[in-house]
Amino acid sequence: MAERPVIVVVDDEPAALAAMLDTLTRRFGGDYRVAPDLSALAALEAIARLKADGDEIALVIADQWMPEITGNEFLGRVRAIEPTAKRALLVAWGDHAASPTILQACAMGQLDNYLYKPWTPAEVHLYPLVSEFLAEWTRIHRPGMELIHIVGDEFSPRSNEIRELLDRNGVPFGFHPYASSAATRLAEQRGVGLGTLPTVFLLDGSVLADPTDAEIMDAIGESPDELSCDVAVIGSGPAGLTSAVSAGSEGLRTLVVERHVFARDVTRLQTNGVKKTLTISDGRQITATAVILTTGAAYRRLEVPGVERFVGRSVFYTTSARPGWCVVSTWRWPAGETRPGRQRSISPPSRAG
């Protein structure tokens, strides 16, 4: 097994392939091995060999118009050989004939996205997009940074609520089942027991046992100390974020109250002269000159008899999927968990749609 994952590039034009090889190697060669091929069919055989040898294939880039098979057909075959590899179609600027192909191939899962050629300067038209592909692959197939450790029951609703909270706020964390060696090691290092789950281990060495969302967000510094502002925005949906950005760009001190970040609700709104006072659920008060209410929307849940009792255990309404989860439309359940209703065998995808 090679130490570095592989980036496969396929183009039947020798000059274009050589330029792509040189450019990708200069930027990514330290961490990835770039494997070029002029033949799509030969590349399929090479990818199969890499797979058999245990090599990891991070990204496959293929030109659309090749004499043996088209790029989208080639990437479809790549998916069958190595479904975890990211797949990018290389198309020429202004190639309108490729547009329907790209849309259909993306919809059918044959490719993840596309790249344009010519792509010079690479710093503008190539490197950022390739970096996105590799970042997505790395997030799934490499250990992530863990600023916070969660120990709990993998199928506990509360454990998954905490994971969802940290996911939403972009806080790097690791989850460890309570019976795992990693959980035992964490408990021994901090000198605590695991009698109360879930347990949250923070970067500063403190430990929270079955904490509330508010306790977690306060502990990681996401709750503001300053509760006086020019504009208070309640809700951080599209309208709330737009309002907050607009107010902030005008130099106004702006505070967004979002239950999934602030971990508290606004329970009361009062007028006190020119000032507005918002009382939040922990009793504290926010003073603002203007208040914008953007309460967002409620989304319809699956109306399937018997499903509700599985919510938070094996059926999840979530903003992100995790490795090992199967995804069907808006249904999410961990692979291997007993599923309500009709049983279907589905391979876990590399990314939630």
Image (cartoon, rainbow, N blue to C red):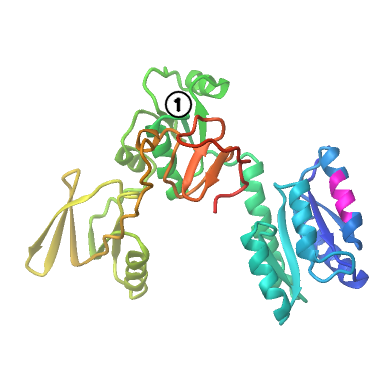
Residue 178 or residue 51, whichever sits in front: 51
Judged from the image, the secondary structure of the residue bearing numbered disc 1 is loop
- 44 relative to 217, above or below: below
Horizontal side of 162 relative to 345 (left or right) equals: left
Determine the main secondary structure of the stretch shown in magenta: helix
Q: Few, some or many C-alpha atoms within 10 Å of disc 1 (few <14, some 14-19, many ≥20)?
A: some
Q: Position of residue 158 (x, y in %)?
A: 37, 33
30 w.r.t. 179: above or below: below
At x 14% / y 63%, what residue is drawn? Answer: 276
Say which quarter of the image contains residue 317.
Answer: top left
- Residue 123 appears anywhere in the view: no
In the image shown, does 126 or 67 lie closer to the viewer? Answer: 67
- Left or right: residue 149 compared with residue 266: right
Task: Identify the image quadrant of residue 160.
Answer: top left
Q: Position of residue 180 (x, y in %)?
A: 55, 21
Q: Say whether residue 186 is visible.
A: yes
- Residue at (87% x, 60% y) in the render: 40
The answer to whether 170 appears left or right of 98 in the picture is left
Question: Magenta stretch?
Answer: 43-48
Task: Report the residue marked by disc 1.
Answer: 153
